[in-house]
Image: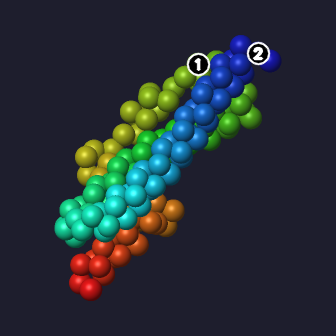
Amino acid sequence: MTAHASDLSQEWRTLQNNYELYERNALLVKLLALVLCMGGYVLGLPFELAAGFVLLLWVQECIVRTSQARLGERIVRIETLVRNAAPATSACQLHTEWLAGRSDSAGLLAEYAHHALRPTVAFPYAVLVLAELAAYLG
């Protein structure tokens, strides 16, 4: 294995491990939302407060998923570089590539919204907010 391939391989392993860590963190945020919602219901927290917590955690997961997506884009790029035997200068370019394609604040908010609407992210937050609303109205 060449030094270049080794550098890209090391970068891929590091990013892949972090990608999986983001996945676990997102699942923990979901679990926290569920626990807070259930605890809020048991303790009789006001709807606005419990639903606010759920919405806040939904936004937090969107931020985690957006960061995870950036790592995923670089992982795919590394896989392409390895397949095409790219030059050694291609390794360790995560932030350089991200900054080159970075959008403005509106673009970042759109990216968060895009992740918020993905079914794997929206569940269970939308269900929890609706359950809180139903409990409030019922």
Q: Residues within 10 Å of mark 2 (few under 14, many from 20)?
A: few
**Residue farthest to the bottom, as pictured:** 138
Residue 102 place in picture, x, y as percent: 36, 40
Q: Which residue is mark 2?
A: 2
* Residue drawn at x 34%, y 76% as measured from the top left: 130
Residue 124 place in picture, x, y as percent: 44, 66
Q: What amino acid is at disc 2?
A: Thr
Residue 68 place in picture, x, y as percent: 49, 43
Q: Which mark is residue 89?
A: 1
Establish if 64 lies above or below 4: below
Find numbered disc 1 in the image and state the secondary structure of the residue it sits on. helix
Task: Name the foreground residue: 44 vs 69.
Answer: 44
Task: Name the foreground residue: 54 vs 95.
Answer: 54
Looking at the image, residue 124 sits to the left or right of residue 8; the answer is left
Quadrant for the C terminus in the image: bottom left
Residue 128 place in picture, x, y as percent: 37, 69
Looking at the image, residue 96 sits to the left or right of residue 20; the answer is left
Establish if 98 lies above or below 8: below
**Residue farthest to the front, as pictured:** 43
* Residue drawn at x 40%, y 53% as measured from the top left: 32
- How many numbered discs, if any? 2
